[in-house]
């Protein structure tokens, strides 16, 4: 494969004997070819412009796009590749390496349940069960209304407050299962 000529169309995947290459989820086919809103292209162009002169600007660009959209839309990745003159395969390699990035749409509010050692021994599995019950989701899923995405993490950096959960930038510590519904309702 010549990465300089790659357009990211995926045709080569069918004949390729290597099966651990980056593949975008097919369920998001409609999001792969165009921005959701006409102004989204301008947002991505502005993000690229802000970081253009930085050395190693790909990560800050992808981080800002991920923050803005809550995921990395295919159209944004294609625009970054075109604007920076990089092969799309290079962009996808970086985007799929870091767990801070998502290649699938996520909800407006991302709920992180900590299952690190301190949180785990202090009851975070019960918190996870309660959040799953309240939202009707399993970890890794997004609600149909695109309001919540539930994710499990190994640490959110507040072991003294175990068990803890985070919704967006808000951290809740020493959470009892009975408090979960009230916390989630603050975001509906």
Image (spheres, grey):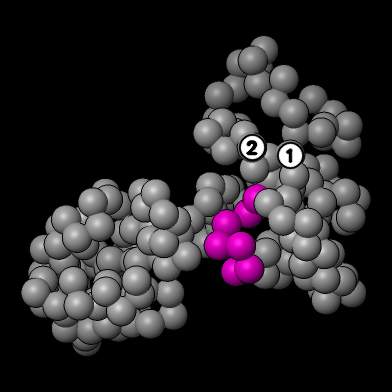
Q: Which residues are magenta?
A: 66-73
Q: Which residue is mark 1?
A: 33
In the rendered image, is residue 127 in sight? Answer: yes
Q: Residue 135, percent across and down?
A: 25, 57
Camera-nearest residue between 59 and 39 = 39
In the picture provided, is 79 more to the left or to the right than 64?
A: right
Secondary structure, mark 2, is helix
- Other-residue count near label 1 (Cα within 10 Å), few / some / many at <14 / 14–19 / ≥20: few
Q: Residue 16, percent across and down?
A: 65, 17
In the picture provided, is 173 more to the left or to the right than 68?
A: left
Please tell me whether residue 164 is drawn above or below residue 108 in the rendered image: below
In the rendered image, is residue 118 in sight? Answer: no
Marks 2 and 1 in Cβ contact (< 8 Å): yes
Q: In the current view of this chain or complex, which residue is farthest to the bottom?
A: 160
When asked about the image quadrant of residue 129, the answer is bottom left
Is residue 155 magenta-colored?
Answer: no
Camera-nearest residue between 129 and 15 = 129
- Other-residue count near label 2 (Cα within 10 Å), few / some / many at <14 / 14–19 / ≥20: few
Q: Residue 147, percent across and down?
A: 41, 61
Q: Which residue is mark 2?
A: 30
Secondary structure, mark 1, is loop
Residue in the picture at 67% in, 70% down? 64
In the picture provided, is 41 more to the left or to the right than 140?
A: right
Q: Residue 82, percent across and down?
A: 88, 49
In the picture provided, is 72 more to the left or to the right than 48?
A: left
Camera-nearest residue between 82 and 1 = 82
Residue in the picture at 34% in, 71% down? 188
Please tell me whether residue 183 is drawn above or below residue 150 in the rendered image: below
């Amino acid at each position: 494969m010549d990465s300089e000529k790659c357009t990211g169309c995926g045709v080569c995947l069918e004949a390729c004997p290597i099966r651990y290459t980056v593949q975008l989820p097919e369920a998001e086919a409609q999001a792969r070819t165009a921005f959701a809103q006409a102004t989204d292209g301008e947002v991505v162009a502005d993000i690229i412009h802000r970081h253009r002169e930085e050395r190693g600007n790909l990560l800050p660009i992808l981080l800002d796009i991920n923050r803005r959209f809550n995921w990395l839309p295919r159209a944004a990745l294609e625009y970054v590749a075109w604007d920076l003159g990089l092969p799309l395969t290079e962009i996808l390699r970086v985007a799929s390496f870091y767990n801070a990035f998502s290649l699938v749409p996520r909800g407006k509010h991302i709920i992180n349940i900590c299952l690190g050692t301190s949180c785990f021994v202090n009851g975070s599995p019960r918190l996870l069960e309660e959040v799953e019950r309240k939202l009707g989701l399993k970890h890794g899923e997004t609600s149909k209304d695109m309001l919540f995405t539930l994710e499990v993490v190994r640490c959110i950096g507040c072991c003294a407050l175990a068990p803890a959960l985070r919704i967006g930038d808000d951290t809740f510590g020493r959470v009892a299962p009975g408090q979960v519904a009230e916390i989630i309702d603050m975001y509906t």
